[in-house]
Amino acid sequence: MLKQLREQVLEANLEVVRRGLVLYTFGNVSGISRADNLVVIKPSGVPYERMTADDLVITDLDGVIVWGELRPSSDLDTHLHLYKSFPEIGAVVHTHSEHATAWAQARRPLPPLGTTHADYFYGPVPITRELTEDEIKNDYVRATGVAITDAFGNRDPMEVPAALVAGHGPFAWGRTPEDAVHNAVVLEAVARMAMYTFALQPNARGVSQALLDRHYFRKHGATATYGQVKK
Amino acid sequence: MLKQLREQVLEANLEVVRRGLVLYTFGNVSGISRADNLVVIKPSGVPYERMTADDLVITDLDGVIVWGELRPSSDLDTHLHLYKSFPEIGAVVHTHSEHATAWAQARRPLPPLGTTHADYFYGPVPITRELTEDEIKNDYVRATGVAITDAFGNRDPMEVPAALVAGHGPFAWGRTPEDAVHNAVVLEAVARMAMYTFALQPNARGVSQALLDRHYFRKHGATATYGQVKK
Amino acid sequence: MLKQLREQVLEANLEVVRRGLVLYTFGNVSGISRADNLVVIKPSGVPYERMTADDLVITDLDGVIVWGELRPSSDLDTHLHLYKSFPEIGAVVHTHSEHATAWAQARRPLPPLGTTHADYFYGPVPITRELTEDEIKNDYVRATGVAITDAFGNRDPMEVPAALVAGHGPFAWGRTPEDAVHNAVVLEAVARMAMYTFALQPNARGVSQALLDRHYFRKHGATATYGQVKK
Amino acid sequence: MLKQLREQVLEANLEVVRRGLVLYTFGNVSGISRADNLVVIKPSGVPYERMTADDLVITDLDGVIVWGELRPSSDLDTHLHLYKSFPEIGAVVHTHSEHATAWAQARRPLPPLGTTHADYFYGPVPITRELTEDEIKNDYVRATGVAITDAFGNRDPMEVPAALVAGHGPFAWGRTPEDAVHNAVVLEAVARMAMYTFALQPNARGVSQALLDRHYFRKHGATATYGQVKK
């Protein structure tokens, strides 16, 4: 079932490890088939070295397992909430990558300090509010997703394809598993450069709106000019 | 004698090097057979590249060598004190991993700033008191262990399986050598992320008790839900 | 056409990746044939793993493509402006290498804090002025080059073969593609050491003029004594 | 001539690169035959990849080349001054390793913040005075050595086998080329951990004299107990 998507999700899970975003099993990638309303996700706590596409789990949008023999990632309900709230996204990545996690632990949004950021994120990467004690006790994993969608309000999640969960770490997303991982990798690099920037300049400010527009729309939307024309 | 444990301890000693926690010979791992009251430990100052399971040393809990031809690690008496004081532990790891050592040199306990920490350590990782001049001169290695157990008081050493020795570096432990090394690796990652977090937010605070509970007990104890059910 | 230069430029583009200066496709190297007034540059957004010398693009100094089937790097106009303004240079490198980019994002020139810097850069590496909103909207890429040449004024670009573009990242140059990449690699190392230095000493000062002279002219100009005599 | 020493010096030069202390050709190792009063040193500016034992240069203590076809390292006169002033040393290493260089650029001595430091350096690693303009202009390389020996005064250079040259970088030494490189590697690790420590605790203090004694003399001198007994 959904063999191609399972292989893409497996490959994306392995790529976050190769890129140094994940220690042991501290991360998970999922992908969705919008045609089937089914989500493919990494199993919980299985070492990456021996994971195959047959170890992945398929659930519906309520989290009911429809295929697979293992338990799904313990973060499943966060992924499901994001898929239900953000209809354009096709994949979700969660890691504890170290610099993005430091911003999440510092409870600071990540401002757009340069063009590397602006090429991928059209404005600050938001930080979520604190969860209530009630949310933590009764509905923690889904509430993590709710805090992310709360942080976006009316902002377009495709324009800023990531969020920092306070006291936890980053989530990123994209149209495909490969695209979502790419965004997670760039987020970590941007978070690292932003940490260095504030070390050198405690009053660092974001780039101007004009520069943000110039870089973001060079790579995104109808007027994009970066890369080769798709044939 | 104790061949299986010697192989586990050798593998754990090599793993701390592969994980980047140890420069030259600055580290040591031991394991205990509780059935035999015998401890297997790395020899002192032998390069890892040529260490075999036959180079390990076996001592009783008083440090009397009962097997092996080499001198045991110079930190043996710290390990022995921990085995005698903490009956649940089966292995001890000592490294000078750079970020955990920086916290130890800064003489600061490591607070639980996020869920990565909470998944492994149920509260701050304690820093030891200063040793007295008398302890340093007369019984230094055992006194290092005493300072660790003093820092725990009535806290459960299985809930926070590590300590920072002031002006020295980290010790970690676990049920098995593999488990103890895993904790030492996570400690270093958590120490690094905590350093980054304080760089971004000098007033960073630990996570709430509710979040600490939620994450710690997801992975530990009778109600744990993380990973696959053991068959 | 210009096969040897294309191979040098390809090799230089691969070298910046191997040296860790470039994530994904965030960088570009070009070289110029002064005899032909033709520039060889990396194509836009093509993964390095499958780039060959036949994927490079050749343009004249007005940016008209005279050879090649792909779109040139989106930074082409910055390169062209530098070639027109700095007649001694034979190659240009642009990266988002993380520490040089942090200085660029902090909008600080990079002072000569030690002899590593002085061996390559005869004084501070300049930071560019902010671009105007008009420049960003109408002529952004060329204006980036103008900001660099403005930052040099009458300074000799061969004595400080690099600049930091505010809110963006570093450009470096040299007589050949290999030489320009060498300067970009040293710039990143010097930027990293300067960040560490200011962490240890917020009031760090540049080296004396005498030391700057001593080191710079040991490696450069008619009185250079470093290395082996070219036969 | 001195083939065995040339091979040791070659190996030591390659080891500093493998250990990540040296970028391009920014470092040099020499060794001395005290029986012959002859020094073997790396040639100037030759890439490490193609260096062989036949490329090394042999000079007397006045710097007169007695064997070899290449120019010696441009830092030769610093090495020679150290050999003449410190009769116990058998090898000298100079690098621009990044953290030790940051301390040198910050013009701060490196205090003994923990036992890693105390195991190798019996007290602070000194920082040299500024060179005078006259020294820089007329006798720069030898004067660098003089500044190092000035910084030691009556301290024993075998008890602290390294120095930080202000605005430049570290020199380390030892009884053999292998030993000197080992000290240079540990110096860099200790410098890195000390930088982290001050980030976490701006008022960090050195370890007590008792702890310094305990660790240093565990590894050095007649009462050393670390490692295996030499047979």
Image: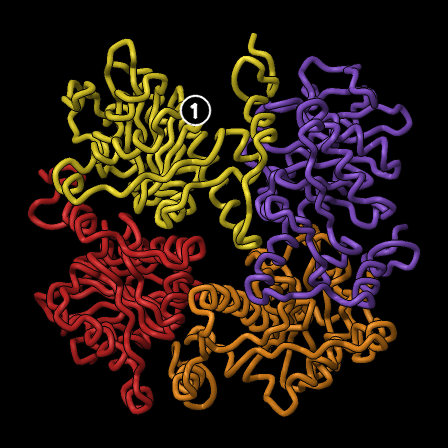
Chain colours: A purple, B yellow, C orange, D red
* Residue B6 percent coordinates (x, y): 30, 20
User: Would residue D154 be found to the left or right of residue A131 on screen?
Assistant: left
Across the whole image, how many numbered discs are drawn on residues?
1
Please, which chain is the residue tagged with disc 1 on?
Answer: B
Nearest the camera: A106 or D89?
A106
Q: Position of residue C112 (x, y in %)?
A: 48, 78
Q: Is residue A163 left or right of residue B62?
A: right
User: Which residue position is annotated with label 1?
Assistant: B179
Horizontal and vertical percent position of residue B45: 23, 39
Which image quarter is the C terminus of chain D in? top left
Q: Nearer the viewer, residue B19 or A60?
A: A60
Q: Is residue B220 visible?
A: yes
- With respect to residue B61, does A99 lie above or below? below
Mark 1 residue type: Asp
- Does D114 sit above or below residue B162? below
State the quadrant of the N terminus of chain D.
Answer: bottom left
Most extreme residue toward the top is B231
- Picture quarter containing residue A180? top right
Left or right, C100 with respect to A155, comes to: left
Residue at 60% in and 29% down: B210
Q: Residues within 10 Å of mark 1 (few under 14, many from 20)?
A: some
Judge whether D80 appears above or below B82 on screen.
below
Residue C79's quadrant in the figure?
bottom right
Residue D79 spot, x, y in % from top left: 23, 72
Which residue is drawn at the image coordinates 56% and 22% (left, top)? B217
Instruction: Kindly tell me whether residue D4 is visible in this rendering.
Output: no
**Residue in the picture at 89% in, 54% down:** A221
Residue drawn 75% across the image and 35% down it: A92
D103 lies above or below A140: below
Q: In what element is the residue under mark 1? A: helix
